[in-house]
Amino acid sequence: MTFAKVGVLAGDGPVRPEDLEAVREADVEAIKLRAWVNPPTDLNAYRDTGVHTFLVQLLSPRPGVASTTAEDFVIECGPAVAGFLKAGATDFEIHGEPNTRERGYGVSWDSPTAFSEWFLAVAQGLRAEFGPPLRVGFPGLAPAEPAPPGVTLALSDEEFLAGCGDALDAADFVCCHVYWTSRNQMRDYHGALRFLRTYLERAEVRHKPVVVSEFANVNPAEPLQDKGDQYAEFYLLCAQYDRLAGIYAFLMRSPDPAYASLRWIQADGTPSPIPALVGQRKRMPHPACLRLAWPTAMRAYTQAFGDRQQVYYEASYDSDHDVHWLHGGHEGVDLKA
């Protein structure tokens, strides 16, 4: 049995020794790279640390600057895709946050349906050119609240998803972005955990792997020590859901001052507290290792953990006390209720 891979977005440019040390310290299992930012040769360096799962984002500034057709995008991406495939990467996130103006909304597409058609054409073009084992992923969307730094939301993620059914159906996997500003918001059913029902319960996504291709506490005032503790908890929480394939923190390092409060490695090359705290995280035990003294009765379920979360959450409402007693919102025993 495998659990969601613990991942992080690689820093700008070729991999550095301090990156590899942070990967080892945090016991990272997966790396997200960006075409045109990270070279394919980095994969071997990460493999030497024990990492064998990679996600490559095909993120181009062109769709947000000038009208970019799907054919234009495929032509631009072709050499990068070929290089990463040759290096052994197979999973590609197509663009990113298309519900923001900086990434193409109002320039290369003017509606979710238009982006869905654009994505379908890009996926078809890449598959026709490269064939298997290439896998294409629907991109992560910018959530409405809290918004990530540096982007202007055009539509909420839920509004955008509603018009992208065909693209979601055609994708090999689906990416999402998750942000929060406090520990309480991270744990909130209507906060960071909203992504579980927004994606896992969507009909077009129900039978596909979901990848959290970016997550972070985006509050610049939150101490890095607290962020590290929260990231360790979030990784463990996501390991409960067998349809979550990978969880990628934002980000290893960046020279951009806007990301100073998000970096695992500071501008001078010294590590923040985050890698060490992530490395000390609790691990999800294999089910065969669990021995429950209660309950004494057992039932076999064919329903995946996390399905129908919204239904169970709503059914747990106690009108007398104005509270939802089901905290986890999932099928089966809720150990926190």
Image (tube, rainbow, N blue to C red):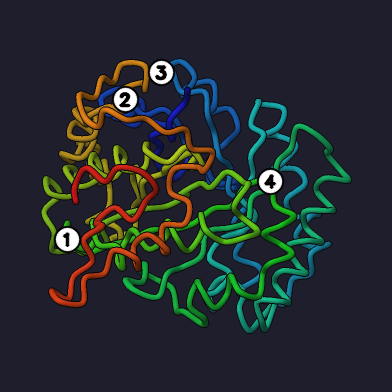
Farthest residue to the front: give it: 297
Instruction: Classify mark 2: helix, strand or loop.
Output: loop
Which of pointers 4 and 2 lies earlier in the amino acid sequence? 2
> Do the residues under discs 4 and 2 have CB atoms within 8 angstroms?
no
Q: Residue 184 carries which label?
A: 1
Which of pointers 1 and 3 lies earlier in the amino acid sequence? 3
State the residue at coordinates (65%, 67%): 62
How many residues crowd around disc 4 within 10 Å: few (fewer than 14), some, or many (20 or more)? many
Which of pointers 4 and 1 lies earlier in the amino acid sequence? 4
State the residue at coordinates (36%, 21%): 286
> Do the residues under discs 4 and 1 have CB atoms within 8 angstroms?
no
Using residue 148 as the reference point, say whether residue 231 is left or right of it: left
The CA distance from mark 4 to mark 2 is 27 Å
- Residue 135 in the image: above or below residue 281: below
Q: Quadrant of residue 17?
A: top left
State the residue at coordinates (28%, 29%): 26
Tag 2 residue: 27
Instruction: Classify mark 4: helix, strand or loop.
Output: loop
Kind of residue indicated by mark 4: Asp
Q: Residue 49 carries which label?
A: 3
- Exactly how many numbered labels are in the figure? 4
Relative depth, front residue between 189 and 56: 189
